[in-house]
Amino acid sequence: MVVGADTPVGEVIIGELIDPDREVRAFVSDPSVGMRLKEAGVKVAVGDVSDTSHVSAACLRCHTVVLVCDAGRDGREISFAADAGELLGQWAQAVSEAGAKRVIWVANHPVPEARVPERATVDGDLAPGEIANRVADLDDAAAL
């Protein structure tokens, strides 16, 4: 699952992860991006990235969840959070509740600790292609 798949970095990550042997899911706020991703074979959830119950439900039974922090800071509506910091805390809670095994944050700032067995952070200041490569490598790793 890529939360924030409708950010520029999120779309590049999705492109890197798409593979016939891998189920790829995306959580987006932009329905037009969601339609484009569905056409590419991605399972898509559309909603407010700050709706913790919706994010948690979309992440249910996902081994790896990629959290693209730009989705909380790019000006989109976050109806259920006061600010980006609160949103990130909600994401950490949502993926923990969903039972994710691995969380990969894409951020250029400190992130809250998600209570999952494996956690990693990819520097959000890298070029989008490099971020996507690192996320794919982490997703493919036997353990973090």
Image: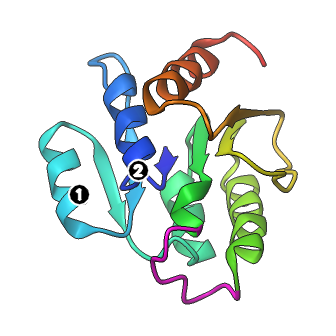
Instruction: Tell which of 57 and 139 is nearer to you.
Output: 139
Which residue is depicted at the point 43% across and 45% down? 10
Secondary structure that dominates the magenta span: loop
Where does the C terminus fall, quadrant-wise?
Answer: top right
Query: What percent of the width, then of the height, locates residue 29?
Result: 37, 69
In the picture of the structure, the residue carrying the numbered disc 1 is 33
Extent of the magenta region = 73-82
Going from the N terminus, do you reach mark 2 or mark 1 first? Answer: 2
Query: Is 5 within the magenta?
Result: no
| Picture quadrant of residue 124 | top right
Query: Is 75 within the magenta?
Result: yes
Q: Is the residue 24 above or below the residue 52 in the image? A: above
Which residue is depicted at the point 56% across and 50% down? 68
Q: Amino acid at mark 1?
A: Val
Q: Is the residue 32 above or below the residue 81 in the image? A: above
Drawn side of residue 38 relative to residue 22, left or right: left
Instruction: Tell which of 81 and 64 is nearer to you.
Output: 81
In the picture of the structure, the residue carrying the numbered disc 2 is 5
Instruction: Tell which of 123 and 10 is nearer to you.
Output: 123
Marks 2 and 1: CB-CB under 8 Å? yes
Q: Secondary structure at mark 2?
A: loop
Q: Amino acid at mark 2?
A: Ala
Query: What percent of the width, then of the height, locates residue 8?
Result: 38, 48
Instruction: Tell which of 109 and 32 is nearer to you.
Output: 109
Drawn side of residue 28 relative to residue 90, left or right: left
